[in-house]
Structure formats: C-alpha cells, structure tokens
Amino acid sequence: MALEAKYNAQNVEDKWYSYWMEHNYFHSEIDEREPYTIVIPPPNVTGVLHMGHMLNNTLQDVLIRRARLKGYNACWVPGTDHASIATEAKVVAKLKAEGIQKSDLSREEFIGHAWDWTHKHGGIILEQLKKLGASCDWDRTSFTMDDDMSASVIKVFVDLYKKGNIYRGFRMVNWDPEAKTTLSDEEVIYEEKQGNLYYLGYKIEGSEEFVTIATTRPETILGDTAVCINPQDERYTHLKGKNVVVPICNRVIPIIEDEYVTMEFGTGCLKVTPAHDENDKMLGDKHGLEIIDILNDDGSLNSFGMHYEGKDRFVARKEIVKELESLEVITKVEQHINKVGTSERTGAVIEPKLSDQWFLKMKELAQPAIDAVLEKDVNLVPEKFVNTYRHWMENVRDWNISRQLWWGQQIPAYFYGDGKEDFVVAETKEEAYQLVLEKLGVQESAFTIDELRQDPDVVDTWFSSWLWPISVFNGILEPDNKEVNYYYPTNDLVTAPEILFFWVARMIIAGYEYRNEKPFTNVYLTGIVRDKQRRKMSKSLGNSPDPIELMKQYGADGVRVGMLLSSPAGNDLMFDEDLCKQGSGFVNKIWNAYRLIEGWKVSEEKEETETAVMAIQWYGHKFQEALAEIEDHYSKYRISDALMATYKLVWDDFCSWFLEMVKPEYGQPIAAKTYASVISILEDNLRVLHPFVPFISEEIWQHISERTPEEALIVSTWPAAQQYDKTFIKDFDFTTEVISGIRTIRKEKNISFKETISLSVVNSEKASPQFDAVISKLGNLSALHYISEKIEGALSFRVKSNEYFVPIEGAINVEEEIAKLTEELKYTEGFLKSVQGKLKNERFVNGAPEKVVAMEKQKEADALAKIETLKASLSSLS
RNA sequence: GGGCGCUUAGCUCAGUUGGUUCAGAGCACUUGGUUUACACCCAAGGGGUCGGGGGUUCGAAUCCCUCAGCGCCCACCA
C-alpha cells in the first residue's frame, strides 16, 4: 500500500483514537504491576477547552503514556467539577434570559435546572480532550456531584465537625453582592483602583469645633459607631472622652482611643464602622461598640441608609458626597489608590460583612502538609513554589466553607430552634433527629422530624475537590477498599500555580487527614498561557485561539508539540501559532522519513555497504546518548527539553545523518540486513516519540508491519538504557566536520553536489579511517587519499590540525586564500598569547587544579602547531 | 508594606557544585540549492561587553554587595 505523500492528521488521529478506545488500552485495573496514577484537575463541568487545559492535559498525557510504555499500570482518572458558584451563575443567567428569577423557584426546581444544564453542557470538555489524544481511563470518569462523591463530602464535614475542626461563627466574611454569597479569602482578587480619600468634618458634641477624619467609603458613615484616635496623639488630647456627631444621620458616637490607629495616615483620626470593616470590627469588639449594618445582601443600602435606602452602594456614595458637600463638611478630597477586593467569579466589589458562617480551622490540619513539602515527601516543581507554599500555609486563616448557593453539597447541619446553638450536624436527617432528641432530652412526641430545618447553604466547591485524589477511588466512604489502597497515593499532579492554595495545598491536607499519607509525590506547576504581548489568554480579551480549530489546522500531534516546545515548568508560555506550525512541520518530517524507508526495495542478495554498517553502529551509540539525556530531562520534569532532545535526535541525527548514510543509490535496492536494522532503529525512535506525538507514531508503527492488538505501540515498551561508546560518537563528530568542510568548499567554489571531487588529507590527528566510506558517500568523493605533504595550489580546509586538500584546476584565488590564512594566523597568535599569559602567571599554575593547567598546556601546543602549518601554507602561497 | 523570582542572540529559553566540550539550543534572519522522502525541505553562514556598577578569586554568565527594570504571591492600614 503506497503512502499518501501528504500526512492527513485528521483521519489518522480519529482512526487511532477509536482503535485505542476499542482495545481498552486506557483502562486500568488492579494487577501485580506497580501503579502509576494521575488524577486530572477536574475542569468545570460546563466549561470549554481553553489553552490552559491544552497545556495541562498534553503534559499529563505525555507522562501517562511514557509510564505506560515503561510497564507501569498507568491510570489517568478524568472527571469534572460541579463548580458551585460558576455553574450556578450560568444557570441563573440562563433562567433570567428566559424571564425566570431564581427566587421564583424552589430549591428542588432550581437544582433540576442546574442538572439539566450540567447534562446538556457537561462533558463537552471531556470530548474535546479526546481530540487531543488524552489517554484517560474514561471508565473512571468522575464528577464532584456524583452520589458517592457528595456522600464523601458530607461524611468529611460531619467528621471534621465532630473532631471540632469545623465550627459555626459570626464573623467578618467576604460578601459577593452579585452572587449573594460569601467567598473564601482565596476567592477575592485585590485590584488597585483609583479612588478618592475624603476628609470629613465631624462636629464635636457640645462645641462648634470639628474633628476631621479621612475615608475612602463615605457611604459607610451611616454605620459609624465611634471615632478612634491614638492615645499617643497629642493633637487630639483635648478630645478624649468627648462625643462627635455623624453628619447626615446626626448619630452621636464616642471618641475612643486605640494604639491601632496610625497617626501618620490621613488625619490620624479614624471613623469606626464595625459592620463593614474587619479592623473596625476588631475595634468594635474591643471597645464594646454597637454594630450597624447598612447594607442589604444585594449591595444596596437598607433602612439605616435613610433616604438612600434601596440605592446601590456606589450610587449612594456619589449622592452622599454631594450631600456632604452641600453640608460643607468635606474639607478636602485627595486622589488615592487603594486595593479593592473583587469576586473571582463575578467581578463584583466585595463587601466585608458580618454573618453566621461555617469555618474550618486550618492551623492544626496544615502542619503535616507543611512538613510533607518541606521534607520533600511531596515535591513541588519548580522548587521556587516551596517558599510561597510555606508562607501561605504558615499564615493560613480559617477557611470559610459555606456558600449561600444551592448548587453543591448542602451543609448537613439541622436547626431545631432559633438559638445560636440550636443545631446538630449529622449525615442524615434521621440521625440528626435522634441527636436533637438526645440533646433536648425529649420524646419523639415533643418534637417532630419535620420541624428540623437543614441549613440551606452548600459547601465551597473546593471542599469537595480537596478530596478528589481519594474520593475518585472511593477512599472516603470505604477507606480500606482495594482500589484506593492500590492507586493511592498518586504519582504526579499537573496543574496551574493559580490554584496552589485553592486546591493543591488543601488536597495535601486532606490526604494526611484522611489517608495519613500524601495524595501525590510530585506536583508539576505549569505556567500561564499568554499571547505574544504577554497578556493572559482569556475569553474576554478574545486573544485565545480555539483549541479545536488549532487541532484541525495543525493536527493534535502538531499542537501538542507546539504547546510543549516552550513551556518550562512554572514559567509562562508565550503562545504563538508558529509553534504549532513547527509542531506540524516535525510531524511531517517524521512522516516523510518513513515514506523514504517504506519506498525502498529490499534485496536479500545485496551486501551491506560499509557506510551503512558504520551508520548503524553509530546510531546505536547516539540513540543511547540521547536516551540518557531524555531520561534525565524527564526525571527533572523538563518536558520541553525532553521534547527538544527527541526532536533533534529524530530530525538531525536520524534524518539528516543516519538516513543519508544508509540510503541506497537511486533506484538500487537496500540490503535486507541493513533494512532490518533501519526498521528496528525506526521503531526505537517511535517509542520515544510516542508520548509527544502519539498519533503519527502509532500510524507508522502499525504500517511497518501487521500488529496484533497486544503489539500496538501505545502498549509496547520504552527502550532500555544501555552502555554506549562516547569515543565512537566523538570520532563520528570529527567526521561530520570533515563533511561540512567539503560542503563549504563546494558552496564557496560553486561546485555542484552532484559533481564528484577528490580529497586528500594530511592526517596529523591520526583520525581513524573507519569513517572514510561515510566521508566518500556524503561528500560525494571520487577518491580519498592519505598524503604526507600538502598539495600546492589546491583548495584546502582544516579540521583540528588535519589538513584537507581538494585539487581543482585554477580554482584557487591566491589573494583570497592569503587573506583568509592571515586572519586565522592572527587569531591563533592572539589566542596563544592569552594562553601563555595564563601559564606564566604563577598563581594560576599553583592555584588551579592540575587538570586545568594540563589543558592549558595542550592548548598552547595545539596553537603552536597550528601556527606552524599556517605559516607554511602562507609562505608557499606567496 | 512583606516575601519570592526574573534580566544571556531579533524572539522563546538552556547553562547542574566557579575551570575541558562556555558563551549554547530552537525559531527567525542571510546566502546557495528542487529530475532521485520532505520547500512543512537540504546545505552553509551572520548574530550576544550574559541588565548597569563594584567586589571575592589565578579564573565569574555562575559567588557576594549595590543600582535599575520587570513579574508573581501574600498582607486589614482608614
């Protein structure tokens, strides 16, 4: 069957992906082999594939395919995340477009819509991953809202509550007025925003005097319950113990004293609004201040906002400024840059808000997770993230895990009264009921189960995904099951540094808490995919190419290579479509190399050529050298370097040198023995190529000969490391220099590559003649002579101290030649001078290691010899 | 404000404990080449005071100090 001249990625890729699926190669089950496990960072269930996923999953697939070839029981668990807030926001928006408000629906109805949405859009992203070639064990596909996953979350919640790690607290939390839910500290993004610092005069009670405070949020004066000064501040000594009047609402509030106030900032006089600022809350608690919350859940002002009631906080701010101006209490307005917290999901400006929420105590839980990373039980790659991780973990604050949403695991807390402590936590309502009866010490008749009210809130999405490496193997509900015991801990985790705290750190915590063991050994942190202008690729900027389109254009193999070409761990990837072009160019190169081999006629009678014999020997060594380098790169997770080493091995060494050497003369057959070696070498190349370009490698592999399903490349073996001869490689390198010299002469003198020439050498280097046949073939020589005297008037070049001559009638330009030689002489003399300078320096001779001194001496001798020959050549010319 | 990291060829980056092969790779660029796998190709070639300055050393891209620029993370300064 003749091969198509042009490689059709689309057809080939679909064909082999189906074949792989059909034969279940991706599926893993417990056996006697050592497992190698990766759990996918579950993408949002309703998300679509973006460039970050492409990078991430290409890396994971490279790792898992290589592990599979290395004989591990490779298991890559795929799945999706229900993404509580993100998905709920999408569903709310969709319903709104249909004229339905969330508040019009019951919880059950809304969740029904959410499931519809999930079923409709969910899993698209997983289908897209298949296009990329992701060899996930699809039988194990999990979803964080699967029944067993949710049950695991509930079990863990109850467990942590019982252990006293989870508590309910009335605390200052981050409130997203758009999603109308609280957020964890990690979900708040601080952005620098240009704002104003308003200086407001508060009238001192019983006096005509004013005291000036500075604020960036003038609307909050309606919630002020004190003004605070530093007791050290002599400017305000006279105010101690007095009261002031808040403008507009005319509330009388005390002046309190606290060291907390920075005298240098603003006026050194601080207004205290305990309901709307964490520090103010702290002051309020300390000084027993009243708490006045002026905001509704949607960010509009409530009745404490007086005539601004119902107006959005930002509208109210503007209008209040106007009123304050008219009251002439604004003494100054300064431009002020401050950091404003915004919601990671909705972008809304976060309001600090006091409310009852569920919190997880982190400090104790974090300790084993800190130790694990510091003791390198868990390796972060690159290592620079260890510091960041440590710093965060050592200063970790309690985690607000409740969300005022419906889409997610509902908190298993049941209320039976109106008191702060009138609740129980249990896995089921029935258990909760029993607990309540016990707690109250009453009979069933006194309190019915229907009177129990489950907390309407759900847990943070990350409170489910932190169990992911355990729960995908059902290790929470059945801690001693065979699967989790076999596959856990997993080997590698590949993810973005953005979620180091959100997810990675918490998984490590959960791992130690629930398995008493790390969840994975290595964490490979990728960079962010950016465009050429270094902007992060995002939907809103519209600067992200569509991965599916890219794969159509360049083939999945091409895009994989493109993604990997420039993505060192932890460094951002400056994505450029040209990288994919380079990738598909590489695929094309592999394809054509195979077309060449495939087209040869094979002859049993024909003898192996000397060149081919040397080529096969050399490539054997070269391949091993490259393999060692590739392995080294892999071991350090330098995947792009491993790819580049493979790229050069295949393109330069295999195609440009090896194939050129074994290639039979035009129209001639190739010796059967040579052919067999070429095929074997090609197959080894395909094995190391496979993790990077799975499709074309399988295509060629299967085309080489008929293979049974057991013999597919995907489940074949990684080449074994062997001893190799470095000297042999070095000698060959010398040979390539000679060939380059011949090519240079041909080019300079315009001698066609088809025209044979004769070469003579003065072999001062005593170079081995073993490669002479190679030189003859690749240099297209008519003859190769060893001579002892230089040839006058011939074209010449040097490799080290060897001199090569190509006698061509009248081809030599004496002047040019003299100029060239003079220049080289000058350079060599300068070089000699610097070497001799070093050798004359006693401190160098005494201080440097012998090896280095000997080397310098050798350099000196070489230079002297070279100068001799150069001078001789010059004198013969002139 | 605290912490971490970066600065090497036009671009993206390697450069392991200072010393063979230390100034490299890929891409881009220049020049020449297509009847014989591939123009998504072949061959040859040009290109960098290793951010600036200072120091340690016989010797520094590599170690120390300092300055400049950039990036990331964390932090409640109104």
Image: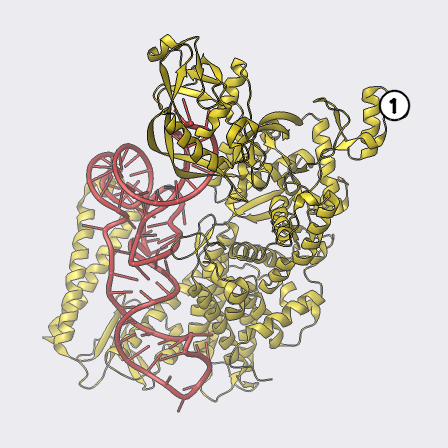
Chain colours: A yellow, B red
Q: Which residue is mark 1?
A: A446
Amino acid beneath label 1: Ala
Q: Which quadrant would the N terminus of chain A be assigned to in this image?
A: bottom right
Which residue is pictured at 48% across the width and 54% down the height?
Answer: A540
Residue A127 visible in the picture? yes
Give residue A612's position: percent from left, percent from top: 47, 77
Which residue is pictured at 45% across the width and 36% down the height?
Answer: A340
**Location of residue A539 with respect to A596 vertically, above or below:** above
Q: Which quadrant would the C terminus of chain A be assigned to in this image?
A: bottom left
Element type where label 1 sits in the image: helix
Q: Chain of mark 1?
A: A
The answer to which of A143 and A71 lies nearer the viewer is A143
Residue A387 visible in the picture? no
Q: Looking at the rendering, which quadrant does residue B23 occupy?
A: bottom left
| Drawn side of residue A443 relative to residue B49, left or right | right
The answer to which of A37 and A604 lies nearer the viewer is A37
Which residue is pictured at 74% across the width and 52% down the height?
Answer: A30
**Location of residue A261 with respect to A302 vertically, above or below:** above
Q: Residue furthest left?
A: A878
